[in-house]
Amino acid sequence: MVMQPWLWWLVIAGVLGVGEMLTLALILGMTALAALVAGAVAGVGGPLSVQLVAFAATSVVLLLGLRPVARRHLHQAPATATGTDALIGVTGVVLEPVNGDGDGRVRIRGEIWSARATIDGQVLEPGTSVRVLRIDGATAIVHPAQL
């Protein structure tokens, strides 16, 4: 039994499609689409030379035209930090003495937060400028801003 040319193109497209799923490089997926186009040409009775031209032309158009657009959309900037994540790295001012036990208070972006110093035994006095390292529950973990 001899396989029809369109079926060969379909097999090639399938193999390239599986390869794309394994690599996610977008190159094999574009050539798989080009193989489907060549298979369609073969399906309507086009000669091998026309099938190869259709495959090559579609590959070039997809790789040069669609791939850069697709990559741009895949590699978007990271999402903007929200909630307590938006406070990391922000400076604030000590309102009540801050120590390693979490007894102090700081003002961060107009809000008053419980605060804990990062260094045990260190006491940050009122008026000291601090930087938020992380948020632990409802407590800001801070260290002096000049460090």
Image (cartoon, helix red, strand yellow):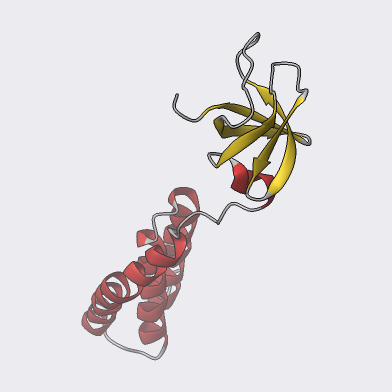
Q: Residue at x 41, y 68 (%)?
A: 70
Please provide percent x and percent y for residue 42. 37, 83
Please provide percent x and percent y for residue 94. 64, 32
Q: Is residue 126 above or below residue 48?
A: above
Image-based side of 147 in relation to 134, left or right? left
Q: Nearer the viewer, residue 80 or 10?
A: 80
User: Could you tell me if residue 2 is visible in this image?
Assistant: no
Name the quarter where the C terminus is drawn.
Answer: top left
Q: Nearer the viewer, residue 1 or 48?
A: 48
Q: Nearer the viewer, residue 115 or 31?
A: 115
Image-based side of 112 in relation to 85, left or right? right
Instruction: Count numbered badges in the picture.
Output: 0
Instruction: Name which quarter of the figure residue 55 lies in.
Output: bottom left
Q: Is residue 87 above or below residue 25?
A: above
Q: Residue at x 64, y 53 (%)?
A: 82
Image-based side of 104 in relation to 93, left or right? right
Residue positioned most to the bottom: 44
Q: Residue at x 69, y 51 (%)?
A: 83
Q: Nearer the viewer, residue 87 or 32?
A: 87
User: Could you tell me if residue 137 is visible in this image?
Assistant: yes
Residue positioned most to the top: 121
Instruction: Name which quarter of the figure residue 64 lies in.
Output: bottom left
Q: Is residue 35 above or below residue 20?
A: below
Please provide percent x and percent y for residue 66. 35, 74
Please provide percent x and percent y for residue 81. 59, 51
Q: Residue at x 37, y 71 (%)?
A: 69
Instruction: Name which quarter of the figure residue 8 lies in.
Output: bottom left
